[in-house]
Amino acid sequence: MSLTYTLPEGLPWLGGAFVSSAWLLLYQSINVSNHRKAAGISYPRAYADKEEQDKSLAALKFNCAQRAHMNTLETLPVIWVFTLVTAAKYPHLAASALFTFVIGRIFYTRGYSTGDPTKRSGSFSRLYTISSAGLILSSTFVIGQAIYESLYA
């Protein structure tokens, strides 16, 4: 006996976007590990202290790489919620926005990991800001429309 599953249109793209965000986190984890090793910062310390950072560019780069990763971990759960709500009505839009967020975060991470925090906000890294705003607005529209229809339909 074999089971056949039919996925709603757009769902594979949404799955691909979610998988891309997992790859983003893996990339950032490896990036942090490489900078940790180069700076000689041992576990369980999450960051180099200010004195180490002031004396060593490697320690500064480690702190910046770690901050880029932590900032993504802080942001991603909310982005996923906005993505799922948007996907209820517009799965292609949700998938595109999440994937664009991931691409922007790659550039954000690369820029931040140079040790110059101002480089985290380059032109391509701003893609994550634009896609975040799109997801916030689209998910608000989707849920607002659903509430309105439940009240007045």
Image (cartoon, helix red, strand yellow):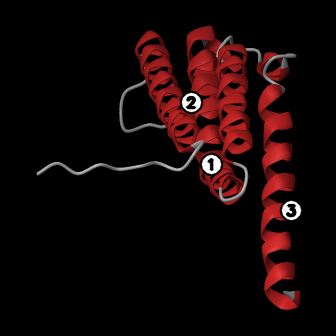
Pointer 3 residue: 141
- Residue 19 on image: x %, y %: 48, 34
Q: Residues within 10 Å of mark 3 (few under 14, many from 20)?
A: some
Q: Are marks 3 and 2 in contact (CB under 8 Å)?
A: no
Among numbered discs 3 and 2, the one appearing first in the sequence: 2
Residues under numbered marks 1 and 3 in contact, where contact means CB atoms less than 8 Å apart: no
Tell me the residue at 77%/32% (across/down): 128
Q: Which mark is residue 66?
A: 2
Look at the numbered disc 1 and give the secondary structure of its residue: helix
Measured from the top left, where is residue 115 in percent x and y? 69, 14
As helix, strand or loop, the secondary structure at mark 2 comes to helix
Query: Outermost residue, front direction?
Result: 1
Decide which of 13, 127 is in the foreground and name it.
13
The CA span between labels 1 and 3 is 24 Å
Q: What residue type is disc 2 on?
A: Gln
Comparing labels 1 and 3, the label whose residue is closer to the camera: 3
User: Foreground residue, 61 or 2?
Assistant: 2
Neighbour tally class for label 1: few under 14, some 14-19, many 20 plus, Cα within 10 Å:
few
Residue under pointer 1: 74
Could you tell me residue 79's position as x and y percent? 68, 49
